[in-house]
Amino acid sequence: MAELKVEQYVVGAVMTNCYFAVNEDTREMLVIDPGDSAKKLIGKIKEKKLAPAAVLLTHGHFDHAGGAEEIAKEFGIPVYAEEHEKETLENPSINLCGMIGTKEVYHADKFVKDGDILDLAGFSIQVLHTPGHTKGGCCYYLEKEQAVFAGDTLFHDSVGRSDFPGGSASVLIQSIRDKLMPLPDDVKVYPGHNDITTIGWERKYNPFL
């Protein structure tokens, strides 16, 4: 089993959690949701002598995808997103970049689907399609390492917003119940904003569930 170290960087106007999922054995790593501050994140990667394998996007909103292209180009690595998220990424009125006064188009190099297993940076990562915040929102589950990167699907004592284009509160709750709640209690949840939590805590105390 690879030794996982997760580093958290809060970036951008809405305080988004960007995560480095680092394989301590090999120094390979994944960049998850680099929504802003690409230059700062690139600097950290180089300073720590890490070897990025991919950028993983949980969804296509500006505050999660904004720095992806610059980082991908710098290191010559692909950007991954869920197959239903193409429109969110590429449509400025859906990716919400108007909130920061821009008209941005984002892209992914590889579109994955629910249940896919990605072999990246020495980790086996399961794609969980969790629509409701966006149509192609997804979580990345590292079963052996007991970690799930949940984007804006599930938060500590809360859930993602569903009032944006493509969102649905009922779909979101169903996604969480079907895909995340069956995971073991000890699985650490790394959300897109605010504090890290666990599946067990959310199953017991999350008022939305």
Image (tube, grey):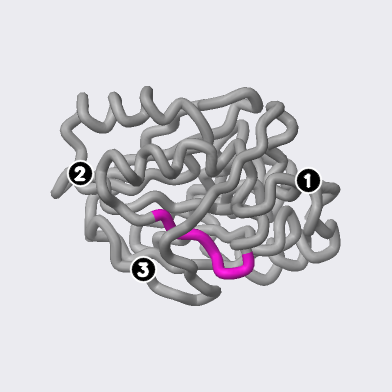
- Give 171 or 39, whichever is nearer the viewer: 39
State the CA–CA distance, disc 3 to disc 2: 17 Å
Q: Main secondary structure of the magenta part?
A: strand
The residue drawn where x is 29% and y is 61% is 120
Three-letter amino acid code of the residue under disc 2: Ala
Quadrant in which the C terminus is drawn: bottom right
- Residue neighbourhood size for the residue with mark 2, other residues' Cα within 10 Å, grouped as few (<14), some (14–19), many (≥20): some
The residue drawn where x is 60% and y is 36% is 63
Three-letter amino acid code of the residue under disc 3: Leu
Q: Which residues are magenta?
A: 79-84
- Give 87 or 125, whichever is nearer the viewer: 87
Q: Quadrant of residue 176 in the image?
A: bottom right
Q: State if disc 2 and disc 3 touch (CB < 8 Å).
A: no
Residue corresponding to mark 1: 161
Q: Is residue 83 magenta?
A: yes
**Secondary structure state at the residue bearing disc 3:** strand
- Position of 127 relative to 208 (above/below): below
Where's residue 81, x and y in %? 51, 60
- Give 105 or 121, whichever is nearer the viewer: 105
Quadrant in which the N terminus is drawn: bottom left
